Image (spheres, grey):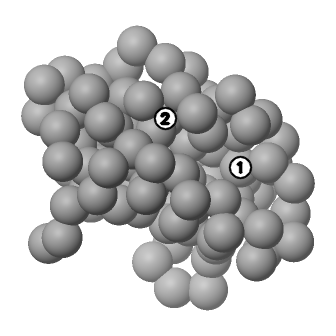
Amino acid sequence: MQTYTATQIVADIVAHIQKSGYPFGQWYAGIASSIDDRLFGDHRVPKENHWYAYRKAISDEHARQAEADLLRLGCRGGSGGGDEGSVFVYAYLITAITRE
């Protein structure tokens, strides 16, 4: 899987959010070491017919920076989670079927 810098990740995810037409405040952003466990498991985001995006960062530092930038833009979530393996940055539209 290709890896990205924090700047590239934020640009890609922001473009996706804007394409959805929903405001940043209706999106949740976070970091994880496993997209399957965190995004599709813990948050219960459906893999089909749902707005979400994720990218793999070149390091956990880049992932944390991208997460912080998305939170500053208004996405819900909290910083400080994850570990050294948390290189995936994700965002999803919060709906009645997802779990923050």
Q: Residues within 10 Å of mark 1 (few under 14, many from 20)?
A: many
Q: Position of residue 62 (x, y in %)?
A: 31, 36
Q: Is residue 40 visible?
A: no
* Residue 84, quarter of the rendered image: top left
Q: Position of residue 33 (x, y in %)?
A: 19, 42
Q: Position of residue 69 (x, y in %)?
A: 58, 33
At 20% across and 61% down in the image, what residue appears? 3
- In the drawing, does residue 83 fall left or right of residue 41? left
Considering depth in this image, is 36 or 55 the residue closer to the camera? Answer: 55
* Residue 65, quarter of the rendered image: top left
Residue assigned mark 2: 67
The secondary structure type at the circle numbered 1 is strand
Q: Amino acid at mark 2?
A: Glu
* Residue 95, quarter of the rendered image: bottom right
- Front position among marks 1 and 2: 2
At 12% across and 34% down in the image, what residue appears? 85
Q: CA distance from mark 1 to mark 2?
A: 12 Å
The numbered mark, 1 or 2, whose residue comes first in the sequence reads 1
- Residue 58, above or below 70: below
The secondary structure type at the circle numbered 2 is helix
Considering depth in this image, is 16 or 5 the residue closer to the camera? Answer: 5
At 83% across and 42% down in the image, what residue appears? 25
* The residue positioned farthest toward the bottom in the image shown: 49
- In the drawing, does residue 84 fall left or right of residue 29? left
Q: Residues within 10 Å of mark 2 (few under 14, many from 20)?
A: many
Q: Is residue 47 visible?
A: yes
At 46% across and 39% down in the image, what residue appears? 66
Give me the disc on residue 15: none
Residue assigned mark 1: 27
- Residue 60, above or below 52: above
Q: Amino acid at mark 1?
A: Trp
